[in-house]
Image (cartoon, rainbow, N blue to C red):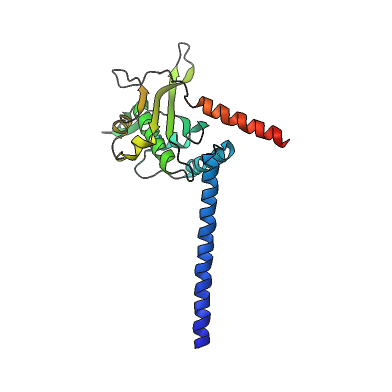
Amino acid sequence: MNEGVTIGFALIAAFFGGVGLLLFKEARTHRFWRQLVAQNDMDAIQGILDQELEHWRTQRPPKDVSAAVWSGVQGLDLVSASADHVRVSTSADPEFGTIDGQRQQIASSLDTAYATALRLVEMIFYDVPNFRPTFVRVDVYTTFRNEDGVAEARPILCVEADRGSAMSLDWNLPPQSLAREFEVIANRAPTGEPRPITLPDDRFTDIVDDAASVASTDERRDD
């Protein structure tokens, strides 16, 4: 019996030792990636974001998110990123539903744009592992027809969010209420439909260009 108890304790010790080793390795991996991000390693930042964005593209929509909004989440494109910021773009379309047996518009493309942009801000701030950007910018486009009837994608919303303001928000509030806490550019016509806007300059362009220049210099040195 004593031998059986000894074996049992040995197995338990081995089990917890294995779990502890796995947790140690995982913590070390997380620390490794966070150090690379802090050093503004563009390859590491790109890899982290690409992996998470691909996960979002294959993820089923949450129950509280409409199909139109989730389509915008899954259709996003990464424009630029650094240790301090992420800029993405996506598109939004009007949302339709059946009311009293009639197919009617229940949300304009600008309404969808707000919901999509604020959902992306929240996800980028809180759902991306090993990466805590200070700023997130989301540009949202929709389709307009020019004078020749040709479809063109033009911007209708720009949201620039900072982590400090985001941390104090109740994310269950309506998107347009949340947007008041951030820098927003939009132009809604009296009919409720969006008008095209002019996007502001990207204030992080110099950071991204400098990081790319450093990476290029390092590659030449390795050669």
Q: Residue at x 37, y 34 (%)?
A: 118
Residue 24 screen position, x and y as percent: 52, 58
- In this view of the protein, which residue sits in the foreground, 178 or 12? 12
Q: Which residue reaches farthest right?
A: 223
Q: Is residue 166 left or right of residue 56?
A: left
Q: Which residue is the extreme one toward the top?
A: 147
Outermost bottom residue = 1
Residue 27, relative to residue 184: is it above or below? below
Q: What is the total number of numbered labels drawn onto the structure image?
A: 0
Return the x and y of residue 129 as percentages of the image width and height: 48, 46
Front residue of 107 and 45? 45
Q: Is residue 173 above or below residue 12?
A: above
Is residue 50 visible to us here? no
Q: Position of residue 158 (x, y in %)?
A: 40, 25
Residue 12, percent across and down?
Answer: 49, 74
- 14, above or below 211, in the image: below
Inspect this view and state whether residue 113 appears. Answer: yes
- Residue at x-position 38% and y-position 32%: 161
Location of residue 143 by image quarter: top left
Q: Quadrant of the C terminus?
A: top right
Residue at 49%, 45% (x, y): give it: 130
